[in-house]
Image: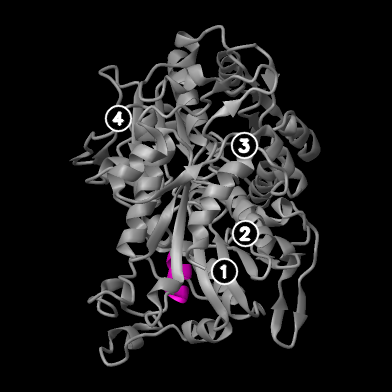
Amino acid sequence: MLDKVKHVILVLSGKGGVGKSTVSTQLALALREAGLKVGLLDIDLCGPSVPYLLGLEGRDIYQCDEGWVPIYTDDSKSLAVMSIGFLLKNRNDPVIWRGPKKTMMIKQFLTDVKWDELDYLIIDTPPGTSDEHITVMECMREVRCDGAIIVTTPQGVALDDVRKEITFCKKTGIAILGIVENMSGFVCPHCTNCTNIFSSEGGVELAKMSGVPHLGTVPIDPRVSVLNGTTRSVLTELPDSGTAATFKQLVEKITA
Amino acid sequence: MMPEPENCPGVQSANAGLGSACQGCPNQKICSDPNKKLEDPGKALVAAAMKDVSNKLLILSGKGGVGKSTVTMLLSRYMARSYNDKNFGVLDIDICGPSQPRLMGVEGENVHQSGSGWSPVGVDDNICLMSIGFLLGSPDDAIIWRGPKKNGMIRQFLSEVDWGHLDLLLLDTPPGTSDEHLSVVSYLRDENQPNSLKAIIVTTPQEVSLLDVRKEINFCKKQNIEIVGVVENMSLFRCGHCGNTSEIFPAKTGGARAMCEEMQVPFLGSLPLDPELTKACDKGEDITSVSNATTQALEEICKNIAKIL
């Protein structure tokens, strides 16, 4: 399984909608900017977002002798992507599966996709601590998994669930690379005052409390969501933004 | 509990008991016998326990973090205030990430066992709440369960909680279209009263959310659950300093209203992105008595939902 993949990183959060997929895609794009070969696997089977975020909706997966060929974002083949979104006939089709079927699919994504040589494989997950997470955690025992990046927003109600995810990692022996605090304050484009819509500093405090590194803080920036649907990195498109600074740091920490 | 075998065709399948994975499964005989139409014994227990619960409303969304729990909390509190002669219950079936105890301001409360089952926690005179959050020793405790165990817990929440007489039970769900959703629908669907189970859908205006929400709407259609309507949350942000509004989660594809037309489901209304509300959620405070943009929008939405009472 994943024999030619040098590093595997999980992107986790107990809470939904905090930006796991955005962090996963922008991290994959940032690692690619650093000249690395990157894979991105979306194991959110009921709500896959990666094809949309990278503008790859409607692409078809082909089979070769060695298995499924992932979708490459361009001819350089430096970013390979796999998601259940590519296997659905219609983008509105629901995937109504119980756990065992989801488990089978995830195992197939890890074993039957021709990932080839990769420097990094980023795995984007659904919220929670259930079937998908248990399966991927079990599979990670057989591969070189660097650990998990935990994404949260600063709100108490998100932190509650993220604390549970940290416990999951600790109990199951997944190393935690650190916490990214997302949606951390919005600068009004009219008056430039910053409002902490979803509170502030929650991720920093959680990192301190649970003794894991704080990897950075990402503000709410509508300019970043404009990049949705493309394979453009914040590093090249918005080099002066706080988001770009955080991802630059993140890549340095990960590849150090 | 034994895990379901991988590749299990499912009890409803024509291949039940006949597939290769069925060899050696302890339930093979039951599944392959066409005369024994498998009925989960839990369903009868749930029906007996919920006989005085007149209406059930699922709060669904394919997407996480769009405000299912917040909308559940706002609806139950607003309706309980507006219809103080009626009783409301809230059941949180998000097993891995329960948020209701904090939002309702009853974090750390205990659930008591009585002769007639677990007593739900009273939030107000006419709202009671049950959540797995009340059963955890610490907020750090993780529930690391696969589907069958989550389903067992949901069944217990339905059949072993002393819900008593309720006019409306609101069920707050996790994101997705998987175990929790299938279980709760199969337990609560009543063929004699198909109208007693309905759903509302919560979304934010962005396409990345609408994408998953369309899947959830199709889930409801496939399961024959009537959709009362769609609530759009986090629509516009009004800056507290200058009063101007911004679209933080831009509706590039027309937002929930356009999606409702496309999917032919009713649009119930939009709730603004309100920093006061997010603060109140974290502290568990009730803001439904205050008059502001959020409660005005809520009033319109509740009027539509109250029709099912």
Label 2 SS: helix
Q: Please tell me how crowded label 1 is: few (under 14), some (14-19), or many (20+) other residues with Cα within 10 Å.
A: many
Residue B79, numbered circle: 2
Q: Are marks 2 and 4 in contact (CB under 8 Å)?
A: no
> Which residue position holds label 1?
B168
Amino acid beneath label 1:
Leu
The mark lying in front, picked from 1 and 2, is 2
Residue A70, numbered circle: none
Residue B59 can be seen in this image: no
Q: Residue at x 40, y 16 (%)?
A: A232
Residue B228 can be seen in this image: yes
Q: Are marks 1 and 4 in contact (CB under 8 Å)?
A: no
Residue B23 image point, x, y percent: 31, 78
* Mark 2 chain: B
Label 3 SS: helix
Amino acid beneath label 4:
Leu
Alpha carbon separation for disc pair 3 and 4: 38 Å
Does mark 4 fall on the same chain as mark 3? no
Give, as a single range, the part of the protein colored magenta: B182-188
